[in-house]
Image (spheres, rainbow, N blue to C red):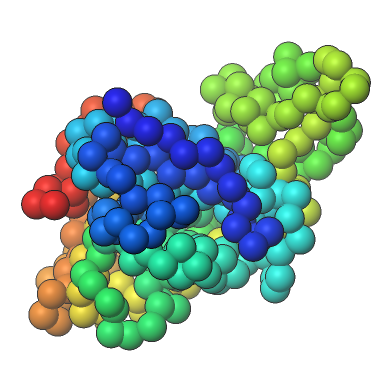
């Protein structure tokens, strides 16, 4: 079965954990063993590395020589309690991850980012030293490279959700309180339930909870996500990068016809040796692709892990 190494704080700046296939022997404490192929999995806004826990274990079982690095991005999960340097932005989050993999002396072969995490992965490629040390498969799940269009009402829009969370007290009496408050404000029951995964018990004040989120920082990160334009990374793809976009069939993300057309144009123009752009559609899935259709997502991602 897959092995999970306990989360650690490296240099006091980022929370992470490894999920390793049963054939992996490498560890941070014994780096003399040959490094296994590594994939980095990045969550979206208001998420945490736990969003990838179940799916990464499935990958580790199917590809036993691989290891999967799950990270709490700045202001999220266990990283929310760390004072991070620089502005809270897509670019800063990407630099955090590049620093982490550099300190671990790892060169990932696969980067998978969901939503906000997809833009972070794109920014990592943008900031990485060129030429790349080895080819990388890049997966941007249900996100586009450009600026984000405003959403409509009743769409569980992240900016509105962040605002609603900011209106709640720092300590809440129960998970049910959060669910009831958010659903009364018009958010879906699924999103309200999901937000309770960001609660942690208040020590000595059972049954009260507080947030494993830096909401002010997350608000700044989401504003950066909306404003960040990384089309140049896609349209002038770096040698050794294969950039895969995955659109959920029932996505709430605003996939404009122009975005899809532009990705297909980049696909046709990716003539650099060892580089490519590709578009995929995940059927029977909304924005939460790894929860809505994990079997379909697994099948699409499989090609990135073959041959190792």
Name the image quarter holding residue 105: bottom left
Q: Is residue 288 above or below residue 180?
A: below
Q: Give x and y (percent) for residue 275.
A: 17, 73
Name the image quarter holding residue 154: top right
The number of callouts visible is: 0
Q: Give x and y (percent) for residue 259.
A: 33, 62
Q: Is residue 174 above or below residue 127?
A: above
Name the residue located 34 percent from the left edge and 50 percent from the top edge: 26
Please identify the residue farthest to the bottom as the structure is shown.
130
| Residue 216 relative to residue 222: left or right | right
Name the residue located 28 percent from the left edge and 38 percent from the top edge: 21
Q: Nearer the viewer, residue 64 or 306?
A: 64
Q: Give x and y (percent) for residue 103.
A: 50, 67
Q: Is residue 73 above or below residue 46?
A: below
Residue 184 in sight = no
| Residue 281 relative to residue 202: left or right | left
Name the image quarter holding residue 162: top right
Residue 303 in sight = yes
Name the residue located 76 percent from the left edge and 36 percent from the top edge: 211
Q: Give x and y (percent) for residue 133.
A: 27, 77
| Residue 41 relative to residue 283: left or right | right
Q: Nearer the viewer, residue 130 or 288?
A: 130
| Residue 263 relative to residue 180: left or right | left
The N terminus lies in which quarter of the figure? Answer: top left
Q: Is residue 274 above or below residue 20?
A: below
Name the residue located 43 percent from the left edge and 44 percent from the top edge: 18
Q: Nearer the viewer, residue 81 or 233?
A: 81
């Amino acid at each position: 079965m897959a092995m999970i190494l306990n989360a650690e704080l490296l240099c006091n700046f980022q929370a992470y954990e490894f999920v390793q296939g049963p054939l992996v022997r490498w560890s941070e404490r014994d780096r003399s063993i040959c490094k296994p192929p590594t994939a980095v999995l990045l969550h979206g806004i208001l998420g945490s590395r736990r969003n990838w826990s179940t799916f990464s274990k499935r990958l580790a079982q199917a590809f036993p020589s691989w290891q999967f690095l799950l990270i709490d991005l700045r202001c999220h999960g266990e990283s929310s309690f760390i004072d991070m340097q620089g502005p809270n932005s897509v670019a800063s989050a990407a630099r955090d991850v590049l620093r982490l993999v550099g300190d671990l002396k790892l060169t990932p072969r696969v980067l998978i980012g969901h939503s906000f995490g997809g833009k972070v992965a794109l920014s990592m490629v943008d900031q990485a030293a060129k030429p790349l040390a080895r080819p990388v498969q890049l997966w941007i799940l249900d996100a586009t490279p450009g600026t984000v269009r405003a959403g409509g009402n009743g769409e569980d829009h992240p900016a509105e959700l962040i605002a609603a969370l900011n209106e709640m007290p720092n300590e809440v009496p129960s998970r049910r309180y959060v669910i009831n408050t958010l659903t009364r404000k018009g958010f879906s029951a699924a999103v309200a339930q999901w937000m309770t995964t960001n609660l942690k018990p208040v020590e000595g004040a059972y049954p009260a909870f507080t947030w494993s989120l830096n909401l002010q920082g997350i608000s700044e990160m989401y504003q950066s996500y909306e404003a960040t334009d990384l089309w140049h990374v896609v349209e002038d793809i770096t040698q050794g990068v294969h950039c895969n976009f995955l659109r959920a069939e029932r996505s709430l993300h605003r996939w404009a016809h122009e975005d899809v057309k532009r990705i297909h144009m980049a696909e046709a123009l990716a003539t650099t040796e060892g580089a490519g752009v590709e578009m995929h559609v995940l059927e029977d899935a909304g924005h939460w692709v790894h929860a809505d259709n994990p079997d379909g997502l697994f099948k699409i991602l499989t090609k990135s892990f073959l041959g190792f």
